[in-house]
Amino acid sequence: MKKDWILKNKVNVTSPKLPKFELYTRYVKEIWDSKWLTNNGPLHEKFKKELKKYLNVSNTELFTNGHSALEVALKGLELEGEVITTPFTFVSTIHALTNCGLTPVFCDIEEDTFNIDVNKIEDHITSKTCAILAVHVFGIPCNVHKINEIAKKHNLKVIYDAAHAFGVQVGDCSIGEFGDISMFSLHATKVFHSIEGGLLTFKNTELSQKLKALKNFGITSEETIDYVGVNAKMNEFQAAMGLCNLESIEDDISHREDIYNVYSQGFKECKDIYYLPRIEGVKHNFAYYPILLKNNKTRDFLFEKLKEYNVFTRKYFYPLCNNIECYKNESSDTPVAMSISNRILTLPMYSDLSLDEVKHITKIIKHELGENIE
Ligand SMILES: *Cc1c(COP(=O)(O)O)cnc(C)c1O
């Protein structure tokens, strides 16, 4: 422990991006003038149009948060039975299935991408399987082409939890164009946010009307209610924040890329630290910087040690979703996910983090691992 290396200011794993105050208040003035606070207001419509253009997707619908958006997507596809998914995700993914009356079936993950292992999906297919719910973990795209192939062959729907994948492209194609529906989270801690918020993207335009109705109590017109819906609408203050943050998104992602490069340069020679490599042909968003340590003891040591330096990392995702109290009985054997969950540590990554701070954190990690681990 080097006492003089302690950071003066606390560094967390993430910190929300805030636009210029004046930029936000300009939109707030518009809200006061229109007196339109929610229910498809003018800022909501503007934000929706701009997002569709920025992401280059066929259709979008906005929601109050990502989790509700995911539940509405599952309802919209009228799924019933078992859904093959990953245990290496935020618990929201699995709760959404359960809340919609679906049974999660946990499939193991790939060692190098931490995403659902496409070579193991078919082992889990039964007569009750209706869909695959895959997660682009840390913004790294799943093997979308193989998943599409499996789904076609077995007549399954595909939903992507793209909560981490805002702005990611595979070739020239937005990540939101794969599968039947993709969900993006616009929560304050994500790469791009609208305070709280969610977004569904989908190719099939016929779904629009239904998804719109489902987020507004199932109401389809003044006197017709066709679905058992929920209340999951995005309000004007959220849309205003989204519009402000959309102005700087390219710069924000570019700064995250610089952070990625500083960390990766620092860890290049460390054989006991694995970090996610860039994938050829993918436009990354550098949402997170997870590292994989050689064992659980080292991970937990580093997690605690970094706190002493004022650096607060997170064990994303630990515990695994098939290892937590409410899903323990969903029997599953996912040894790769288990091993990764025990060894993973997510380092600070956000748009206001300076490259000097990143260099410093890298130096601390290398020092502590070199000195204290045999
Ligand atoms: C953040 C997140 C969600 C939930 O999104 P909210 O906007 O917070 O409701 C779902 N899945 C994953 C993987 C997430 O990281």
Image: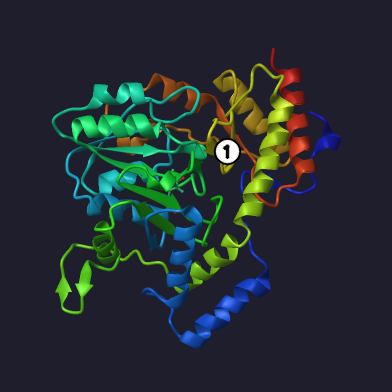
Q: Position of residue 204 (x, y in %)?
A: 28, 53
Q: Is residue 11 above or below residue 337?
A: below
Locate the N terminus by quadrant.
top right
Relative to 125, 164 lies left or right: right
Q: Amino acid at mark 1?
A: Arg
Frontmost residue, 307 versus 197 = 197
Residue at 70 percent of width and 35 percent of height:
261
Q: Is residue 22 above or below residue 332?
A: below
Q: Is residue 40 above or below residue 120?
A: below
In the current view of this chain or complex, which residue is farthest to the bottom? Answer: 33
Relative to 92, 264 lies left or right: right
**Numbered label tally:** 1
Relative to 334, 10 lies left or right: right
Frontmost residue, 108 versus 329 = 108
The answer to whether residue 15 is seen in the rendering is no
Q: Position of residue 212 (x, y in %)?
A: 29, 65
Q: Position of residue 110 (x, y in %)?
A: 43, 24
Q: Quadrant of residue 320?
A: top left
Q: Quadrant of residue 232?
A: bottom left
Residue at 54 percent of width and 50 percent of height:
190
Find numbered disc 1 in the image and state the secondary structure of the residue it sits on.
Answer: loop
- What residue did someone put label 1 on? 314
